[in-house]
Amino acid sequence: MNTTKESTYALLVQQAQALVGSEPDEVANMANVAALIHETFHFWWTGFYRVVGDDLVLGPFQGPIACTRIAAGRGVCGAARQRRETVVVPDVELFPGHIACSSASRSEIVVPVFDKSGNVKAVLDIDSEHLATFDDVDARYLEQIAALFK
Ligand code: SME
């Protein structure tokens, strides 16, 4: 079960490691990692929101135009930041406070990105136009990718 997805992710983590390991600029790395994930799985939207003061501010992404600024605690992104853990949402309509940047988005995963001190400095947000796209396999590998930004 999930062998194909696992092996795709395993390769993707290696590619992300190579990309991030050879470049110190974080924005450049977020841009390429978003592109890598997006191109591999053809998700609806793949990108980063960076913590800037109290807000989450749109960072490098692939996909349609998105909300630029998310206030503390708002939406799935705000929940992942506040809880300091990955949030998997199988049906966004059932998530209280979900921010609908696009009505096409049906399910979502948001993974916190920690700095070296353990503070959340960004979140990796992926949206799907299908219900229940993400599971613990996505969470596990995307957390490995997020850890490359420590
Ligand atoms: N749906 C997210 C907002 C960001 S966009 O989907 C790109 C949320 O509820 O946090």
Image: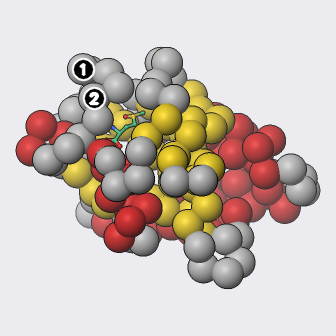
Q: Which type of secondary structure does the marked residue at label 1 adopt? A: loop
* The C terminus: image quadrant: bottom right
Query: In this figure, which residue is indicated by the disc labeled 1?
Result: 103
Q: Which mark is residue 100?
A: 2
The spot of residue 26 in percent (x, y) is 78, 51
The spot of residue 76 in percent (x, y) is 31, 49
The picture quadrant where one finds residue 45 is top left
User: Is the CB–ligand 1 distance for label 2 below 8 Å?
Assistant: yes
Image quadrant of ligand 1 equals: top left
Three-letter amino acid code at disc 2? Ala
Which residue is drawn at the image coordinates 24% and 20% (left, top)? Answer: 103
Three-letter amino acid code at disc 1? Ser
The picture quadrant where one finds residue 136 is bottom left
Which residue is drawn at the image coordinates 62% and 38% (left, top)? Answer: 59
The spot of residue 112 in percent (x, y) is 49, 62
Which residue is drawn at the image coordinates 32% and 48% (left, top)? Answer: 74
Label 1 crowd bin: few (<14), some (14–19), many (20+), radius 10 Å: few
* Nearer to us in this view, 14 or 131: 131
**Residue 7 sits above or below residue 103 on the image:** below
Label 2 crowd bin: few (<14), some (14–19), many (20+), radius 10 Å: some
* The N terminus: image quadrant: bottom left
Which residue is drawn at the image coordinates 80% and 41% (left, top)? Answer: 28
Q: Nearer the viewer, mark 1 or mark 2?
A: 2
The spot of residue 135 in percent (x, y) is 28, 59
**Residue 71 sits above or below residue 63 on the image:** below
Q: Which type of secondary structure does the marked residue at label 2 adopt? A: loop
Determine whether label 1 and label 2 are within 8 Å by CB: yes
Identify the colour scheme used: secondary structure
* Nearer to us in this view, 133 or 150: 150
The Cα–Cα distance between marks 1 and 2, rounded to whole angstroms, is: 6 Å
